[in-house]
Image: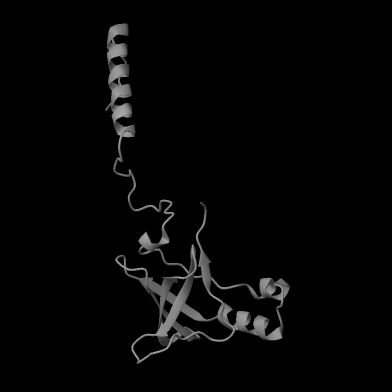
Amino acid sequence: MAWKRPSSFREFLEATVEALDKLEKSLVGDPDPLFPELAVPEPDLTKVRGAFDMSVVDPDQAKIEPGADEETVARAELLQNALLDIRGDKASATAHVDVGRNGIPAGTLSIKPVKHAGDRFRLDVRYLGESSVEPVVPSWAKCSVQRLGS
């Protein structure tokens, strides 16, 4: 719809009514999103696909965490400079992460969120490409995702 200066008050009223009718029709039902490529809130995490991002705790932040020790800070410093190249599939909640040091990939991890207790999830981490019967979860790794919002 284009807006142009009306030549009469009657024309102005007709254009306004038309605009309001279109607005009302767009608010009824479940319209297609204007920008479907942008994220929208999803309360059911089992429906989330292709949302991949990874961040590493800053060593200075790790120092002030409750129960932090020198080993925790050393791991945070190691991860700060590690290669963590994440990629995923829009049809799956699983992410694949190339990991390594000095920019050189050493292997790939497959990370999949698995529903745990109630609204909580745990991350199932396995080596990709090699036989991995058991999840790869180091004793120091604590991975859980909690649903945001209500």
> Where residue 113 sits: x, y (%)?
43, 71
Between 147 and 50, the one nearer to me in the picture: 147
Q: How many labels sit on residues?
A: 0
Q: Is residue 8 visible?
A: no
Query: Where is 90 relative to 27, above or below?
Result: below
Q: Is residue 27 visible?
A: yes
Image quarter (top left, top right, bottom left or bottom right) of the N terminus: top left
Residue drawn at (36%, 85%), measured in percent from left and top?
128
> Where residue 142 sits: x, y (%)?
56, 77
Q: Residue furthest front?
A: 118
Query: Where is 90 relative to 30, above or below?
Result: below
Residue drawn at (53%, 74%), measured in percent from left and top?
143
> Where residue 47 sits: x, y (%)?
36, 60
What's the coloring here?
one colour
Between 17 and 7, the one nearer to me in the picture: 17
Q: Is residue 131 left or right of residue 101?
A: left
Between 65 and 121, the one nearer to me in the picture: 121
Q: Residue furthest bottom?
A: 131
> Where residue 43 sits: x, y (%)?
44, 54
Could you say which quadrant of the image residue 62 lies in?
Answer: bottom right
